[in-house]
Image (tube, rainbow, N blue to C red):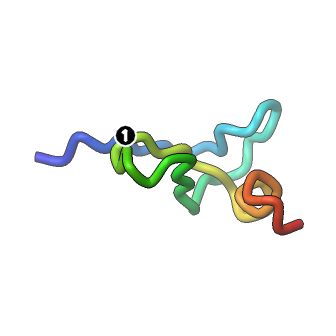
Amino acid sequence: MNDCKYSSVCEFPNCFELAREKHHSDYSKPLEVKFYCFKHHREVDGRC
């Protein structure tokens, strides 16, 4: 059984794009994952 949460909408505030990318803020907590669209995943990572 997989305990990881799946989402279909970006978790960035006021964004309703499809969430196709997973983001880990802390790799020591592998099940704590945020789901973002491509644009906001780059923004959260500081790569925009």
Q: Where does the image place residue 43, in percent across and percent down from the top left? A: 82, 56
Q: Position of residue 12 (x, y in %)?
A: 74, 39
Q: Dot 1 surroundings within 10 Å: few (below 14), some, or many (20 or more)?
A: few
Furthest residue toward top: 13
Residue on which disc 1 sits: 5
Q: Residue furthest left?
A: 1
The residue lying toward the viewer, choosing from 14 and 44, is 44
> Where, by quadrant of the figure, is residue 16 drawn?
top right
Residue 24 position in % (x across, y down): 52, 52
Is 43 placed left or right of 38 in the picture?
right
Q: Amino acid at mark 1?
A: Lys
Q: Quadrant of the C terminus?
A: bottom right
Residue toward you, 24 or 1: 24
Q: Position of residue 23 (x, y in %)?
A: 56, 54
Q: Quadrant of residue 45?
A: bottom right
Q: Residue at x 10, y 46 (%)?
A: 1
